[in-house]
Amino acid sequence: MKRIPIYAILAVLAVFSCEKTPAPSQEPEPVTVDGTAPQSGGILAATLDKGLAPLSFTKTISNNCIGYAYLSGREMPDLFFQCPNGVPTSNGIRSYLGLNLCEFQGWTSAGEPVYGAPVPVKEVPWAASDSPLRIVQAGGRVLAFTISSSKLRFAVYDSEARSFGSSWDNVSISLSGITGSPIAFDMIPEAGSLAELVILATDIEGSYRPSMDDVSESFYDSAGIYRGQMYYGRIYRCTIDMSSWKLQSSPVLISGDTRVTLAPVGIGAFKESLSGTDGYLCINKFGVVKYVPRRSSTVSDYALDAYGTELVNPFVSGAILPIRSKSGTDTPWIVLSGEGAPRVIKSAGRKTFESVPVFEGPYEILMENGDLYAGSLPVPTVADWDGDGKLDIVAGNSEGRLLFFKNFGTNAAPAFGRAEYLKSEGEEICYRAGYYEVQGPFEAAWGYLCPVVFDWDGDGISDIVFSTNEGKFEFMRNEGTATRPSLGRRQGIFLDGLELYGMWRVRPAVARIAGRVIIAMMDGEDALHLYQQTTPKAVKDLGKALLGDGKYIYGHRASATSSLGERGREKLEFVDWDGDGDYDLLVGTPLQASFPDPSYGLPWSRTTRGLQTLWLENVESNENMVFAYPKQFLFRGADFHIGAHANGPTACMLGDTSDGKPNLLVSGEGGKFFFFDRSDLTELSLW
């Protein structure tokens, strides 16, 4: 049966409705569309509206748009994305900087650009390089560039072979006038064979960064002040003859303001004739976009959005790419990319009286027949969030956002739409770290929201219990109804008057067990710890969780996980996995994981990769929870290989659950949801 978009169904229902229209206060009739039974070992797909979903790449760490070319002849260019791959290999984790090409397809009615599925470029000469890259169309050729302090290297794209080849052409140049190291650049073709090379250099190599070689060390002193040095970017410009590959002018500092932006990561030339804007846009690790005029010593200033406020990309960003028109004049569109889905902002065609450009957006870059995508490092919970009897997905991510994927199908054959960004007190949830963060202030843009859907206050309506990068455990009360949820402000959970803290980036396990609300987390020693709720804002300590032999349960690997930032990260969930009536514990392990002991355990003792899902069976009772040594799930006899950093498992009653037992949904770092039928899962144990 053909799938019909939900908006089309609603429109038909409206036309053929009875004469008397239901009052707005009445609950809408639930609508079910055809879904698809999830494929075991596969990724959950977007179903509605031709499968429109954010453009995404499977099993990647980040997705940086590094260039474009008008290859398919359409009004918008095709985009090149550099996608580091963190999938474990037999040699451990490696980061292959693969390249994908996405062809422009068209627009949605809302003005969002739609691109085709990523197609891998077969060969690239930079597979083992982390140097800055840019792909440019000039003189009838598509060229990939990289630079160092003394070399400009380029490779030519073969569109038929979909390859840049396996080697560079090296050109000797002198960038001796640049202070610091090039971190990003743009190449802008000019008249004839000339091109402008604009370079964003950083003094990061000369800056002091505190050591994190021991868990007793910190990036901050006793007063909470960062012990290292902040680094900034400087912008330089020179001219190159692309026929002789000789410098026509030496690099010069563009602006008298040498501190263009803190923690720079990207730069691009921007020109817009309607407003007369001509300069450079640079972006930093926190998503802040700044503008520097091209032919002026005026200091940099914030680019603005359509509301006149500073333009800050609300999603974790690593690259900025202005897109020039086919004529090579204006740059009306800017691609923002990095962690999370790529987005575009559009020139508003005007500037302020201070000559600062104004932009509209951001708009998501979409693809048809895509996968569900929840941003980097999603942490899912499967629950009926909107009270329609169908299981939805609620997920947090590294950006600190909370997403809702509504199920328009059935539990056996779900049909999920695009994510809705949930709000708290009417504002979209986006919890960022800010200045004080375990891994230092340069991680300020990451929130690592780890949610659980649970009725925390006992009023019969699901709330959100969560932790973030702060290692603090909190909740948001649902102040709406079961069918129209509305989250209130974030509130702390307290132990003896102090906020409940533990290791960072941990999803707590929360359940009503034997008449008590129990919350499990990883404490300051990275040990599994149990608490019992006493009031909606307070818990009492039940102590560290125990194995059957009386030992504690730890979650880190001592020999490799020596820093504070590498501890924590576990994703916990209570579930009666084996159907015996007792609540067990599921654990999603981070990269450096060793349960139940730092010196041995799973998955570290049999693989250095971590990133697996463990089952700790409750071998006593719900009244007195004691756990067996962990067992690791294998899918058809093999480890899970779905990404790097960490994973987020959740038991779910999606798919075939005719035996009354749950299946398994596991999120990977790349933002996708992998479904595993329990019939394909076996358990491995070392004890």
Image (spheres, rainbow, N blue to C red):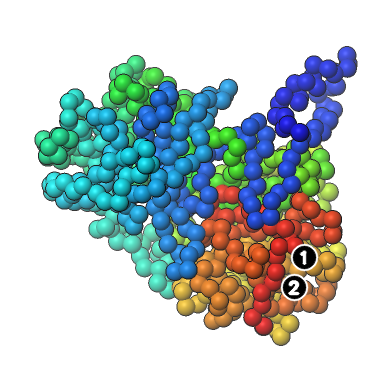
What's the distance in space between the residues labelled 2 and 1, CA to CA? 8 Å
Rendered residue at 52%/53% (across/down): 59
Which residue is painted at 85% across and 18% down in the image? Answer: 17
The residue carrying mark 1 is 577
- Asked where in the image residue 481 lies, by quadrant, the reply is top right
User: Where 462 sits versus 330, above or below?
Assistant: below
| Element type at mark 2 | loop
Query: Where residue 323 sits: x, y (%)?
Result: 37, 30
Tell me where residue 589 sits by quadrant.
Answer: bottom right
Residue type highlighted by circle 2: Glu
Is 182 rendered above or below residue 638?
above
Relative to 418, say whether 354 is above or below: above
Q: Which mark is residue 617?
A: 2
Q: Is residue 192 left or right of residue 478?
A: left
Q: Contact, CB < 8 Å: mark 2 with mark 1?
A: yes
Q: Is residue 643 visible?
A: yes
Nearer-the-camera pick, 644 or 140? 140
Tell me the quadrant of the picture where the N terminus can be found: top right
Q: Amino acid at mark 1?
A: Trp
Looking at the image, residue 492 sits to the left or right of residue 9; the answer is left
Q: Residue at x 84, y 59 (%)?
A: 659
Lower position in the chain sequence, tag 2 or tag 1: 1
What x and y, as percent, mark residue 653?
Answer: 78, 53
Count neighbours of disc 2 (C-alpha within 10 A) and say few if under 14, some if 14 to 19, many if 20 or more: many
User: Residue 496, how many percent across, how many down?
Assistant: 68, 66
Seen as rendered, the residue at the extreme top is 19
- Which of these two is toward me, 209 or 615? 615
Q: Residue furthest front?
A: 160
SS label for mark 1: loop
Q: Residue at x 60, y 43 (%)?
A: 371
